[in-house]
Amino acid sequence: MITLKSQQEIELMRRAGKITAAARALAGEMVTPGVTTQEIDKAVFRFIKSQGATPSFLHYHGYPASVCVSVNDEIIHGIPGKRVLREGDIVSIDVGAFKDGFHGDCAATFPCGRISSEAQRLIAVTRQSFFEGLRFAREGYRVPDISRAVQTYVEQNGFSVVREYVGHGVGRAMHEDPEVPNYVESRQRPRLLRGMTIAVEPMVNAGGAGSYVLPDGWTVKTADGSLSAHYENTILITDGEPELLTLPEPGE
């Protein structure tokens, strides 16, 4: 069931979203050679708690960390640990914060030092595909209008959209209706209405769209070993321009 948020609920979501976006920015600034993914996780945990919020991901269905840190061919749900980031890596940070009954959810992929031109293009295309979809995050359009815009832009640039994982509604629960795929399906998806809050999150592979899950039960990798990038914001559908509830990271 899709829930439309009241003005009071939207204001609470703005607060959660602001903390979430700041946590993403903090994590992104830490993406440098020599840093471990666990160090990023611990810093994000401390920051979110300092804001009077709780990490949305921690213990969610048993997930053991506060942030997902996915490196190179890892698409999503990378578990932070002792892995040391190296020059040339690309690092996807996915984070959520829960405050006053509502969640924020956002992600971005960051370069670790100097990266290849192809990796940089993958990051740029993934990010821009979100903003292509955002153009249709308006009252009266349907979810597939967002999906089509994302898929078309990604594929025109020679990359693939992941099929097994999709965007979603967000609010009192971290995952609510509706699902927001990054590709067009045959099934009908709902019309967008003011008061809806959705997380649009293109996951884009440099190679094929295939993926598989590691034995840890969480980390998702590209089937062909190609690089993958991720970009996400929480969006409020209004009676006009869509509003990003997770304020963009520095530089946007």
Image: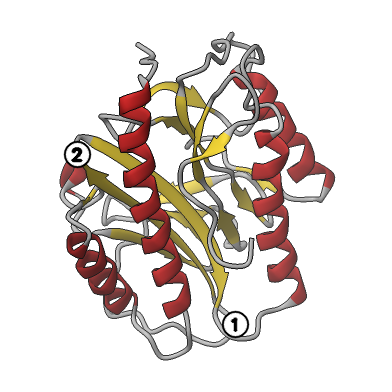
Q: Quadrant of the C terminus?
A: bottom right
Q: Nearer the viewer, residue 42 or 10?
A: 10
Residue at point 30%, 62% (across, down) = 79
Percent x, y for residue 139? 61, 16
Q: Say which label, 1 or 2, has the lower sequence index.
A: 1
Residue at image position (47%, 30%) is 198
- Residue at disc 2, secondary structure: loop
Q: Quadrant of the N terminus?
A: top left
Q: Is residue 238 left or right of residue 240?
A: left
Q: Is residue 102 above or below residue 190?
A: below
Image point (36%, 15%), residue name: 3
Amino acid marked by disc 2: Asp
Estimate the spatial distance between the alpha carbons at disc 1 and disc 2, rounded to whole Å. Answer: 39 Å
Q: Is residue 217 above or below residue 242?
A: below
Q: Which mark is residue 100?
A: 2
Q: Position of residue 144 (x, y in %)?
A: 64, 20
Residue density around tag 2, few if under 14, some if 14–19, many if 20 or more, within 10 Å:
some
SS label for mark 1: loop
Q: Position of residue 236 (x, y in %)?
A: 50, 30
- Is 228 on the left-hand or right-hand side of 212? right
Q: What x and y, as percent, mark residue 133?
A: 68, 35
Q: Nearer the viewer, mark 1 or mark 2?
A: 2
Check disc 1 and give the amino acid type.
Gly
Determine whether label 1 and label 2 are within 8 Å by CB: no
Q: Residue at x 30, y 36 (%)?
A: 12
Residue receiving disc 1: 88
Q: Residue furthest right?
A: 156
